[in-house]
Amino acid sequence: MHKFYAAAAAALLISAAPVAAQTAAAPPAPLTAETARQIVAMEAGIWDADITFPSNEAGKPDGHAKGVQDNRLRSGGLWMLNLFSVAGTPYEGTGVWGFDRTTGRLTGIWADNNDQQIRLDDGRWNPETKTLTWTAKTVQPGGGWMVTVATEKFDGATRTFDMVALTRKGAVPLVSMIFTRRPA
């Protein structure tokens, strides 16, 4: 069960484009506050989550769970408050993300009762693919670091979220979620 919570926490380290593609491409143009409002608004509402935790072990089946994310616009629509829970578990996660005028990008934090620390996220928006890519570097027990890349792809009332950890062996899948927005 501990592995489940670890995977759930990693999953919520808030979506997965290859890092090589990010570094090879020209940096995106800075966002404006109005563009950021439009991006943030796409995640508003209550979303049901179908969660898959890849086993990453040969012969072992993936884990599955259901969750709910309640996303509330705040501060004039420039910021989002995420409240996430996984059914049948005590897991709860809370995030805040939105427009950072100093960088012209999206930025966020995530905390949950599994990791018991605050993760800082840096978000890049790709308007052509309607994809938000988050990167984070979090301290691990013993002083090491874990770098994660998460991608969120928006498609109306459906949103996909995939997260990987970048390791010496390559990208290790941590979680995949398909979110479906409930009707208002």
Image (cartoon, helix red, strand yellow):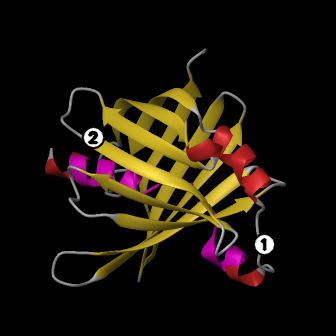
Tell me if I can see residue 59 in this picture.
no
Number of the label disc, if any, that sits on residue 42: none
Q: Position of residue 168 (x, y in %)?
A: 41, 83
What residue is shown at x 37% (from left), y 37% (from top)? 84
Label 2 sits on what residue type?
Glu
Magenta-drawn stretch contains 106: no
- For residue 22, above or below residue 134: below
Quadrant position of residue 86: top left
Q: Work out whether residue 27 or residue 30 is closer to the camera in this orientation and state it.
A: 30
Number of the label disc, if any, that sits on residue 28: 1
Q: Please name the predominant secondary structure of the magenta segment in the image.
A: helix
**Can you say which quadrant of the picture contains the C terminus?**
top right
Q: Position of residue 164 (x, y in %)?
A: 46, 62
> Which range of residues does the magenta coloring cover?
5-22
Q: Work out whether residue 58 or residue 109 is closer to the camera in this orientation and state it.
A: 109
Q: Earlier in the sequence, mark 1 or mark 2?
A: 1
Label 1 sits on what residue type?
Pro
Number of the label disc, if any, that sits on residue 92: 2
Q: How busy is the neighbourhood of tag 1: few (under 14 within 10 Å), some, or many (20 plus)?
A: few
Q: Position of residue 105 (x, y in %)?
A: 66, 67
Q: How busy is the neighbourhood of tag 2: few (under 14 within 10 Å), some, or many (20 plus)?
A: many
Q: Is residue 30 left or right of residue 121?
A: right
- Quick one: SS at disc 1? loop
Tell me if I can see residue 157 in this picture.
yes
Q: Residue furthest front?
A: 76
**Can you say which quadrant of the picture contains the N terminus?**
top left
Kindly report the distance in space between the C-alpha atoms of the residues bearing marks 1 and 2: 33 Å
- For residue 17, above or below residue 15: below
Label 1 close to label 2 by CB (< 8 Å): no
Q: Work out whether residue 9 or residue 50 is closer to the camera in this orientation and state it.
A: 9
What residue is shown at x 65% (from left), y 75% (from top)? 103
Q: Work out whether residue 42 or residue 129 is closer to the camera in this orientation and state it.
A: 42
